[in-house]
Image (cartoon, helix red, strand yellow):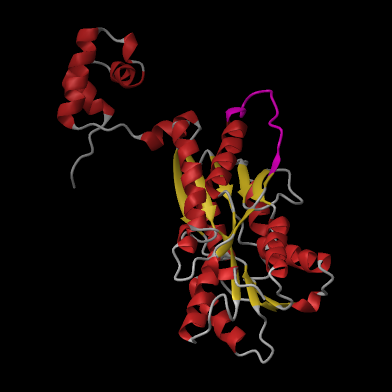
Amino acid sequence: MAHSVGIKDVARAAGVSVGTVSNVINRPDTVATGTRARVQAVIDRLGYVRSESARQLRAGRSRIMGLLVLDMGNPFFVDVARGAERAARDAGLGVMVCNSAQDPGEEAEYLSLFAEQRVRGVLLTPADATGRNIEGFRRHNIPFVLVDRVAEGTTECSVSVDDIAGGALAVRHLVHAGHRSIAYVSGPPGLNQVRDRRTGALRALAEAGLGPDALRELPTERLDVAAGRDAGARLLGLADRPTAVFCANDLLALGVLQALYAAGVDVPGDLAIVGYDDIEFAAAAAVPLTSVRQPAVTMGAMAAGLLLEETELEGSDRVHPHRRVVLQPELVVRRSSLAAR
């Protein structure tokens, strides 16, 4: 096995102390020009790379921020990660991105990994509706910020979008287009986002004088295209088929659109569709998809900023004021919902 070059090897080859090598690496201005050049030449020749993990352990502070999301297959969370990574990079940090796949068990494992790695802090979109994973993670005293989730019942910071307002935007648009019977392809009922979007949908129906029976819920186990296709098949099998469908995210909506297209159902003539998130693929669909836009990149950047603010105060007498940031969604209307009733 090849020997890993260490700082003692560099010191021996350069004829200086380990402390001098350390100063060349970390405080070069404190070392004489000739000595610095000689040590740097040895570093280059031997290919020495300092152990960042060891340095971080000695300092007690990692330069890594953890990010744990529900589904990295969803472009929405890719955009959240982009925003977080940009803010972290500006602060000289890296981001360890992990995917819980909407599984509380996997979420618990990744939170344990973050604790073992002593990450600077964690950005978390919880998969565990019970809150047990978060409660267990707190004992490690690692700061975290909730992303795409309101921090109800917790003292931590959170950055989210008003999903009740978003659900209302989607269904209000469909009601104004003349629809009086609407399906809601929802997703896992344990997710707050799914419940809040349904609450908003019911609110918009009530504003129009319509009861909750005007919304037919079609739950799915996941928030992906395959689940959307399955929901689309169930929608087609309804005897009293609604004239419009609101989906809890764009991947579900794209799956529903595929099922309807395969069955020869005209969108939006026979059935209108509205999605949620406004991912890049929404505008590029065979029938461009009306969607509720979430500022995903901004959400990730703001969450990372709150986490950085908190971690910078660690060890000081100042207290970080926890904040709950709620951003507003926006309806983007495209052809999938434009046919008038």
Name the dominant secondary structure of the magenta segment.
loop
Extreme residue in the front direction: 340
Q: Quadrant of the C terminus?
A: bottom right
User: Up-down: is 163 above or below 269?
Assistant: above
**Magenta segment, which residues?**
312-325
Q: Is residue 223 visible?
A: no
- Say which residue appears at 49% left-offset and 86% top-offset: 264
Q: Is residue 216 magenta?
A: no
Q: Is residue 268 left or right of residue 10?
A: right
* Residue plotted at (48% across, 48% down): 81
339 or 12, which is in the foreground?
339
Residue 165 image position (x, y, % from top left):
72, 56
Where's residue 212, x and y in %?
A: 80, 74
Query: Nearest the camera: 338 or 68?
Result: 338
Left or right: 36 with respect to 153?
A: left
Residue 9 image offset from top left, x and y in percent: 21, 28
Q: Is residue 39 left or right of residue 273?
A: left
Residue 41 appears in the figure: yes
Pick the front one: 150 or 210: 210
Q: How many marks?
A: 0
Q: In the rendered view, tell whether residue 210 sits above or below residue 78.
A: below
Q: Residue furthest bottom?
A: 239
What x and y, as percent, mark residue 192?
A: 69, 61
Magenta stretch: includes residue 324: yes
Residue 277 against residue 198 in the figure, above or below: above
The quarter of the displayed image where residue 144 is located: top right
